[in-house]
Amino acid sequence: MNTQEIPDHDAWSAWHPLELAARLSGVTKPWCVVGGWALDLWHGQQTRDHDDLEFTVLRADVGTFRQTLHGLDFYTAGSGVVTPLPQDTEPPADIAQIWCLDSAERRWRVDMMIEPGTPQTWVCKRDPQIVGSRHEFVRATSEGIPYLAPAPILLFKAKYQRAKDEVDFENALPKLTVPERAWLKASLERVHPEHDWIGML
């Protein structure tokens, strides 16, 4: 496939997390929903529209997820450039995102994010010194959909402070537990020491 045939970057018709979970139901490797959808899974309801759907996997497991997600073509995404990722080709070490294209409908369905860490340990991609137990950081809905806990999701969102990130923070803040607030505050002080969310926590 040549670059002229790659759909526009905004050609998204993202799956619902339930659809992703159904397609990955046989996979035993660790994965979890991240981004705004992770917060809504935590809330137990959809609080806003979502343009995409993001989930994370470990780099060593990318091949397993590609094999499981039938009917999709895969593209590396980085620095605004989307490039085909041929079958049986590993993503380059500097790539942390793989966009998944519905080969029949020509629409992006899900964004597979590559995370550091191990099956037992969650590691923050922005600061590898921020670590924790995967068992503690990854939760699941009553339907069994795994998602990253709210505090680390907000830590990632703090970098950009887009309008939707501010809404997500405002919606989450009243529900965060004391330990979650403390972890997020300490992590923000380390990664974004001048961030205005620090004073709100």
Image (cartoon, grey):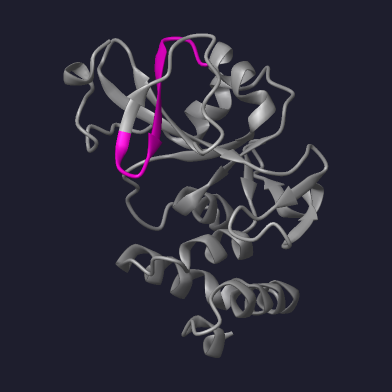
Q: Is residue 36 above or below residue 191?
A: above
Question: Can you give x and y, in whole percent of width and height, for residue 159 in the image?
Answer: 45, 66
The residue furthest front is: 93
The residue furthest left is: 4
Question: Residue at (57%, 11%) from the top-left corner?
Answer: 67
**Depth check, front residue: 116 or 138:** 116
Q: Which residue range is magenta in the image?
A: 69-81
* Quarter that holds the N terminus: top left
Question: Residue at (50%, 81%) from the top-left corner?
Answer: 197
Q: Is residue 117 above or below residue 68?
A: below
Question: Can you give x and y, in whole percent of width and height, for residue 101 in the image?
Answer: 35, 21
Residue 121 seen in the figure: yes
Question: Can you give x and y, in whole percent of width and height, for residue 51 in the image?
Answer: 31, 44
Question: Residue at (71%, 73%) from the top-left corner?
Answer: 183
Quadrant of the rendered image containing residue 3: top left
Question: Can you give x and y, in whole percent of width and height, for residue 4 in the image?
Answer: 16, 19
Residue 45 seen in the figure: no
**Depth check, front residue: 110 or 122:** 122
Q: Main secondary structure of the magenta part?
A: strand
Quadrant of the rendered image containing residue 162: bottom left
Q: Is residue 60 magenta?
A: no
* Quarter that holds the C terminus: bottom right
**Depth check, front residue: 12 or 143:** 12
Numbered label tally: 0
